[in-house]
């Protein structure tokens, strides 16, 4: 439901998605990508999570919608956040103005258990920093949206779902 809310700006009772793995966003719902596309913006999405797959309707309004390791099909756990951000930089169409939506995968699903969670977060943070630097060089008037799967922090790496932890909010 949270992804549908981010895409539409509406709450679950309004857009109708109550469970992201069971409900599809209705095509009648207007998304940010559809609104910007109608205004002449280039719209692109790079998605590393199964809940972002087109079958859930979150691809509405995107002219480019790339998924997974090969960026043509969803394979949960097959692409890491750093690789996804690198794919955005390599693949992005340099047209103005533009919206680029990046949906990062859950670190637990794509990083080996032996990898220090804090180190993995630093690597993703560095990749997102590189993306924003790249972005502002070519699109100072555009919009980049980066979302991630679950709210975790380095002090509580397996805390998720329905809690707001102080460490996660910092």
Image (spheres, grey):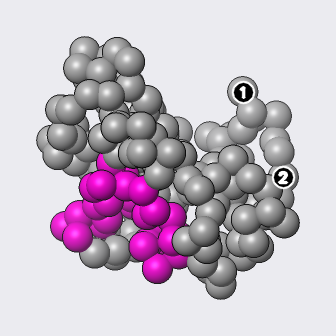
Occupied quadrant, residue 100: top left
- Tell whether position 145 is magenta: no
Label annotation for residue 163: 2
Question: Up-down: is 22 above or below 78?
Answer: below
- Say if mark 2 contacts mark 1, CB within 8 Å: no
> Could you tell me which residue is drawn at 18 percent across and 40 percent down?
93
Closer to us: 33 or 149: 33
Quadrant placement of the N terminus: bottom right
Q: Residues within 10 Å of mark 1 (few under 14, many from 20)?
A: few
- Tell whether position 48 is magenta: yes
Between discs 2 and 1, the one toward the N terminus: 2
Occupied quadrant, residue 89: top left
> Could you tell me which residue is drawn at 71 percent across and 71 percent down?
17
Residue occupied by mark 1: 170
Magenta stretch, residue numbers: 44-72
Residue 166 place in picture, x, y as percent: 82, 34
Is there any visible trace of residue 114 in the rendered image? Answer: no
Residue 80 place in picture, x, y as percent: 34, 55
Closer to us: 27 or 70: 27
Closer to us: 60 or 72: 60
Instruction: Residue at the far bottom: name it.
Output: 22
In the rendered view, does 64 fall on the left or right side of 108?
A: left
> Could you tell me which residue is drawn at 42 percent across and 37 percent down?
39
Under tag 1, what secondary structure? loop
Q: How many marks?
A: 2
Under tag 2, what secondary structure? loop
């Amino acid at each position: 439901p949270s992804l549908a809310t981010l895409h539409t700006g509406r709450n679950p009772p309004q857009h109708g998605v109550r469970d992201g793995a069971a409900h599809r966003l209705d095509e009648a719902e207007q998304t940010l990508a559809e609104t910007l596309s109608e205004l002449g913006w280039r719209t692109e999405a790079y998605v590393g999570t199964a809940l972002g797959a087109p079958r859930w309707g979150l691809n509405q309004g995107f002219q480019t919608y790339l998924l997974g390791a090969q960026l043509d099909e969803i394979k949960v756990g097959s692409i890491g956040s750093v690789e996804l951000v690198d794919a955005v930089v390599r693949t992005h169409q340099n047209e103005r103005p533009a919206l680029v939506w990046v949906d990062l995968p859950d670190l637990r699903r794509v990083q080996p258990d032996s990898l220090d969670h804090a180190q993995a977060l630093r690597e993703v943070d560095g990749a997102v920093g590189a993306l924003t630097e790249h972005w502002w060089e070519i699109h100072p008037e555009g919009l980049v949206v980066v979302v991630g799967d679950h709210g975790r922090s380095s002090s509580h790496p397996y805390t998720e779902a329905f809690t707001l932890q102080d460490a996660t909010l910092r």
